[in-house]
Image (cartoon, helix red, strand yellow):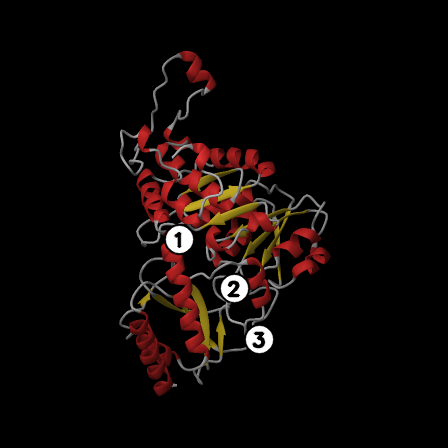
Amino acid sequence: MSKSNKHNLAIETILTHHGRDPGEQFGVVNTPVYRASTVLHPDLETLLTHNQPYHYGRRGTPSSRSVEDVITKLEGGEGSKLTPSGLSAISCALMSVLSSGDELLVSDSAYEPTRKLAEGYLARMGVSTRYFDPRIGGGIADMVGKNTRAIMLESPGSLTFELNDIPAISAAVQGHNISIIVDNTWGTPLYYNPLALGANIVVHAGTKMFVGHSDAMFGTITCDEAHWPALVDTHGLLGLCASPDDCFLAARGLRTLALRMKEHSARSIKMAQWLEGLDIVQEVLHPALPSHPDHKIFTRDFSGSGSLFSFSLPRAPQKALAAMIDKMELFGIGYSWGGFESLILPVNLSSNRSSTAWPNDNQIIRIHIGLEGFEDLRADIEAGIARYRAVM
C-alpha cells in the first residue's frame, strides 16, 4: 500500500497493513525476525554519520521498526520506543523527564511496581514522590510545587478502576513545565487517546493487549514532539531494547488487536452487568457501567472498554476465598492480563493506597475476561461465588 493511501484509514486497516512492507522483504507478508547485533556499513562516511536506516541491533532493526510505526500511528505521537517490559517502559519514560531534586506526582490507583520504582530507585536518585486522589481533576493545581516536573497517571487504575480526568489535569498544570505520563494499557489507543486529551507521554505494558497471547514480555513508549529527543536519548543511554522474537510476537498480536478488543470489551461489560445484579456482590468496579462514579468521563473520553475489572464481595475468612478461587475451572489464577485466557486474582490494597483510603473493607476480586464461551465463563464465576457464600 502506498504512503499516499495511508491517511484517514480505519483502525482495522492500519493494524492490518501499517508497519510492514512485503516489497522490502522479498514478498514476505510479515516482517521477519531480525536477530542482529552488528550491522555492516558500506563505507567510513556512513559509519560516522549513521546515514543508513539501521546501524546497531540495540538501536533498532526492521523487527522493532515494524512495531514502532504501528504504535506511533495509533497513538498519534511523534515516535515510539520499545522496551523489554511494561515496567521498563514506565521507568524509561519517567527517567526521560526527571532529574535529582525534582518531584513526581502519582495517581493513588497506580500499578504497584510504579510505586516501588518511585519509592525505591527514584528516591535514591533524589526524586521525591507524592500521591494524589485519582479523581482530583483540576484540583491537582493545589498540589503543584516549584519542583514538580511530572505526573504519572493510570486511567483506569488496574485494581480499583478510577479514571483520571486528563483534560482537567492538563489544563490545571498548563505553563508549569510539567510532563504528563499515562499508562494506556487498559483502553489501548483503539479506545483511548491520552495524547489527544493533553498528555505528553503514553506507555503500555505491551505484554498484555498488544501481544495478546500471554507469551512475551513487552513495553512501548510514545510521546509528543517536544518530549521525543529526551526519550530517544534516555532510551539509548539505558541500553533498552525489546528482543526481535518478542517484537515479532507483538507485531503478530497487533494484527488482530481490533477484533480481540471488540470481543474483550463486549464480554467484560456483559459480565459486569450480570455481576451487578447479584445480591451478594457489593460493588462492580467497571467504568463502562452507569453506576460507576467516573462513568461520565468514560463516555466522554473512551470509545470502548478494556477486558479487566473488579467486583467486591462481603469480607470472609481466607478459606472462603480459597474455596472460590482454587476450584475455578476456566479462570486461571495469575498476574498480568490481556491474553486469550480468562484470569482471576484477589486484590489486597494494603500496599496500593497512600493518599486516599479505600472506603470499605470488602473483598475485591479482579477478573480478566478472555475469549472463552461467555456462558461457560459466567457459570464458572457463578459456581465460584456459590462456594464463597457457602464458607463465609
Q: Position of residue 82 (x, y in %)?
A: 43, 41
Location of mark 3 (residue): 359
Residue at x-position 58% and y-position 38%:
227
In the picture, the disc for residue 306 is none
Identify residue type, mark 3: Pro
Identify residue type, mark 2: Asn
Splitting the image into 4 quarters, where does residue 323 fall?
A: bottom left
Q: Position of residue 289 (x, y in %)?
A: 51, 71
Report the quarter where the C terminus lies. Answer: bottom left
Q: Mark 3 or 2 closer to N-term?
A: 2
Label 1 SS: helix
Report crowding for label 1: few under 14, some 14 to 19, many 20 or more residues within 10 A (C-alpha): many
Location of mark 2 (residue): 352
* Residue nearer the viewer, 332 or 318: 332
Q: How far apart are marks 1 and 3 (CA)?
A: 36 Å
Left or right: residue 380 compared with residue 312: left
Q: Where is residue 279 in the image (x, y as percent from the top left)?
A: 45, 85
Q: How far apart are marks 3 and 2 (CA)?
A: 14 Å
Q: Mark 1 or 3 closer to N-term?
A: 1
Report crowding for label 3: few under 14, some 14 to 19, many 20 or more residues within 10 A (C-alpha): few
Residue at x-position 35% and y-position 33%:
21
In the picture, the disc for residue 258 is 1
CB of mark 1 within 8 Å of CB of mark 3? no
Q: Where is residue 126 in the image (x, y as percent from the top left)?
A: 60, 45
Identify residue type, mark 1: Ala
Report the quarter where the N terminus lies. Answer: top left
